[in-house]
Amino acid sequence: MNTKPLTVEEVAEAADVFFPIFEYVKGRLPDDTKIEDVLKVAENVCTLAQKLRAEKEAENLPFGFNKNPDGAPIVDSPNQCPPGTVAMKFGNKSWGCYDL
């Protein structure tokens, strides 16, 4: 871990990410909520947001035997690959199109 002191620019960049989230969560809570409680709720909301993001991304992934973790387009025959790509066998009946 880097132990050099943070620069003002680094802190400003982090604050630009943190405070909109903090203010949004604070605005959804009662006016008399303590800052410590806002931070705890914000942490839980962000954890939930990460879980929901992962679920949405998982919905868009191929399923079954057609999973392709590297993201190359999957086609039924090698001549369906776009120009500038090479077809490589992927599974029993499909091909992946990879950039040259």
Image (cartoon, rainbow, N blue to C red):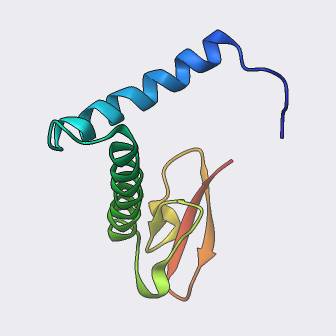
Residue found at x 43% / y 87%: 64
Relative placement, left or right, of 62 versus 81 is: left
Q: Is residue 40 left or right of residue 65?
A: left
Image quadrant containing the N terminus: top right
Counting from the top left corner in percent of width and height, residue 16 is at 44, 21
Q: Is residue 96 above or below residue 26?
A: below
Q: Is 7 situated left or right of 19 in this image?
A: right
Figure disc tally: 0
**Horizontal arrangement in the rendering, residue 73 relative to residue 86 (left or right):** left
Residue 6 sits above or below residue 43 on the image: above
* Residue 70 lies in quadrant: bottom right
Residue 72 screen position, x and y as percent: 54, 59
Query: In this orientation, which residue lies closer to the viewer: 24 or 97?
Result: 24
Q: Residue furthest top?
A: 8
35, 63: nearer the viewer: 35
Q: Position of residue 69 (x, y in %)?
A: 57, 68
Residue found at x 61% / y 56%: 98
Q: Residue at x 38, y 57 (%)?
A: 44
Nearer-the-camera pick, 32 or 4? 32
Tell me if residue 43 comes above or below residue 32 in the rendering.
below
